[in-house]
Amino acid sequence: MKYLDFRDEQPPADMPRRYAPVGSVTPAGRRQTFGIPRPGFGRLYLHVGHDGTFYTGTWQDEFSEPDAAGSLVGVAAVEGTRDEILAWGYAQPAAEKYIADVPW
């Protein structure tokens, strides 16, 4: 099983950027950081990947107040076999769980 970590991801500095015309969007806010989901909160999603050969799971928790690092959301994500992802999902203490155990 592979754990995916979004907390330190940043786009490459030389990534081309295409912005909307001036005045058409609101100014960008501070960079969003990701924390760790809190037990008893958030939603957990388990589903089959698009080609039906791998499964993914995400646990997303929106915080009412920023955590110590300033994060407003906690995210945990994994991908792997059906058995690995189902075991991971059932073991997580999320408030709600949504499981789609059928291929697309």
Image (spheres, rainbow, N blue to C red):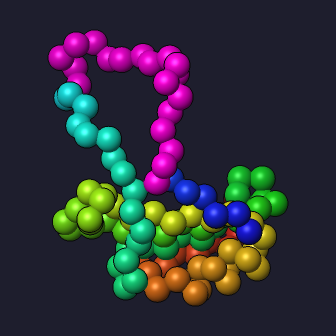
Whether residue 72 appears in this view of the structure is no
Residue sitting at the far front: 68
Q: Nearer the viewer, residue 62 or 71?
A: 71
- Stretch in magenta: 7-25
Decide if residue 10 is on the left or right side of residue 51: left
Q: Residue at x 74, y 68 (%)?
A: 1
Is residue 22 one of those drawn in magenta? yes
Image position of 42 with respect to 91: above or below: above
Figure label count? 0
Q: Position of residue 33 (x, y in %)?
A: 36, 51
Q: Residue at x 32, y 17 (%)?
A: 20
Q: Residue at x 55, y 57 (%)?
A: 5
Q: Quadrant of the C terminus?
A: bottom right
Q: Residue at x 51, y 66 (%)?
A: 76
Decide if residue 94 is on the left or right side of residue 103: left
Decide if residue 57 is on the left or right side of residue 85: left
Image position of 81 with respect to 32: above or below: below
Image position of 21 with respect to 44: above or below: above
